Image: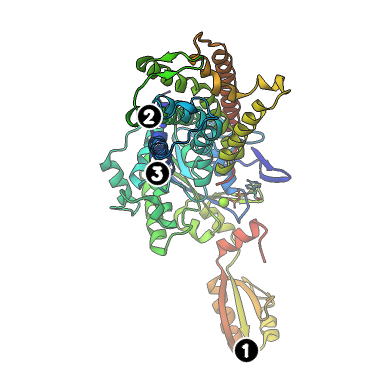
Amino acid sequence: MVKRFGAVRALDTVELRVTPGTVHGLLGPNGAGKTTLLRMLLGLVRPDSGTVRVLGERVVPHRAPTGVAGFVESPRFYPYLSAQANLDLLAGLDGRHASVDTVDELLARVGLAGRGADQVSGFSFGMRQRLGLAAALLREPRLLILDEPANGLDPAGMRDMRALVRELAEDGRTVLLSSHLMAEVEQVCQDVTILSAGSVAYHGTLDALRDRAPAPAHHLRTSDDAAAGAAARGRVGIEVEPHRHGGLAVRAETADLDDYLLALAGAGVTVRALAQTSTSLEQLFLAATGEDG
Amino acid sequence: MRYALTLYRWELEKLTAQWRVRAVFGVAVLAPWLFVAALRLQDAVPADTLFGRWVHLTGFATPLVVLVFTTQYALPLLISLVAGDIFAAEDRYGTWKTLLTRSAGRGAVFAGKALAAGTYTVVFVGLLACSSLAAGVVVLGHQPLVGLSGTLIGGGAATGLVLAAWASVLPAALGFAALAMLCSIATRNGPAGIIIPTMVGLLMQLASFVNGVDPLRHLLLTANFEAWHGFFTADRYYQPLVTSAVLSAMYLMSCLGIGYLLLHRRDFTEG
Ligand SMILES: Nc1ncnc2c1ncn2[C@@H]1O[C@H](COP(=O)(O)OP(=O)(O)O)[C@@H](O)[C@H]1O
Ligand SMILES: [Mg+2]
């Protein structure tokens, strides 16, 4: 399907295949079209052309598909109502009744135990994020859509969120999770789709992606960069070039890097600083989305 | 339909949770008593206002004077305070995406809100009517009212006519509510949804005073606000009520129709 905003093609013929019962990462830099795609899956936005199919059914434009729940950008609630009242309302819109017990259990599950009676206006950004997850789970979706769910969460919150997402997948639910950080996706997802400027740059398993990945990148400073550069020439498994901030940019797997550093010491060149600048997957992500510096 | 009723119930709950709505209802209940108290403290009368001359003589004049005042200046504003904000509030809170990603469709959301705004309008007008009738009769007494042709109207008949007069402005009141809802949907902005219908009301009121705009006169929603005068003459007449009620219904249906289409077609790309 295609979606334009004026001259901007936010999405251009995107196809997304998500295996049921897995956590699928939707990865892309800011403005890649992740949120726009998720809005279409939730029936909030109509594609300019093409159709959206989710869980085997065509999404009627401007209608939330059955079996799908989640949020885009930050979840929003009525600030003057309590968390419990907000969830009651949303359950009602699904034709359900949310008993106090159900809601309490759900709030405990997302780390908001005992906050049901509090007005949402007093909730922090991270607490609203958690409440958003609770609201989505209340719908008992088969496909859960989470748009940058780690935004605004503290480290403990992120850990809880990851654990919960894994748990949900183990229960047989499918989770589609967007992020602009490879590190976040790497920890919970089996499959990824990388979006770049509205098109799919990669679609497949993380393992297959790893196999295609270049070696990790490092920033190296030595007592004699010219000699160090010369020492790399002819060596297998290592790529050395001048770094744009001075020193050398080195791409190599750990074992090859170790050999190289020993060779440098043998040649009388000392290492002043060595730092990994990106992991292999991040390298690939940056290359795929054209953000490679 | 089931979802529309659920939403309707929730919209009422959301409305009563807001201080603005409570304040407007408070004013509707208290203002007539303050008005009557002010009358008791002085001899002057609002002689320019219909029935204004009789305010000291009978309590039945009070609800009619309040009716004239309210419909001339305040009713579109007081209705729009809620109806003009009921859709835009979702934009303000960013909650459209929360509402519209559940099983209830947009039609149900629209119907629930429209019904709630209509209910608010009727309850507000009803409160003001009962409160001003009660304030007048309790404080100033239930002496017969002098009708517009000079005949005396006894207590029982006067009560009925006063309530009928208040009920007769409901078509235009609901018409203004629909206009406010349309503005609320179209502008996605609460203040605009409140101010535009209020200005339209005042302009219509102004236009009805100006001569020479006769073709326009047939399109004035505010004509309905004077239709009750026919109830208080010796030979009662209802033609203005019928005409203005039909016009109000046309306003109501077209505003709601356009509003529904706008909401139905809207892409929620923000918030
Ligand atoms: N409401 C909008 N109006 C105009 N352009 C928009 C709107 N929403 C998104 N866009 C554009 O569409 C593209 C994709 O945006 P988005 O889906 O929000 O990306 P992401 O979530 O991946 O950061 C961007 O170029 C953005 O500027
Ligand atoms: Mg986004």
Query: Looking at the image, which is closer to me, A272 or A103?
Result: A103
Residue A41 in the image: above or below residue B111: below
Q: Nearer the viewer, residue A111 or A265?
A: A111
SS label for mark 1: loop
- Quadrant containing the C terminus of chain A in the rendered view: bottom right
Q: Nearer the viewer, mark 2 or mark 1?
A: 2
Q: Up-down: is A151 above or below B229?
A: below
Whether discs 3 and 2 lie on one chain: the answer is no
Is the same chain shared between marks 1 and 3? yes
Q: Which residue is mark 3?
A: A135
Q: Is residue A205 among what the camera can see?
A: yes
Instruction: Work out which quarter of the rendered image holds the N terminus of chain A and state it.
Output: top right
Q: Is residue A18 shown to the viewer in this render?
A: no
Query: Residue under mark 3: which chain is it in?
Result: A
Residue at left offset 52%, top offset 46%: B92
Near mark 2 (Cα within 10 A), the count class, few <14, some 14-19 or many ≥20, is many
Tag nearer the camera, 3 or 2: 2
Dot in front, 1 or 3: 3
| Label ID, residue A269 | 1
**Residue lying furthest left in this view?**
A101
Give the tally of numbered discs.
3
Amino acid at dot 1: Val
Q: Which residue is mark 2?
A: B136
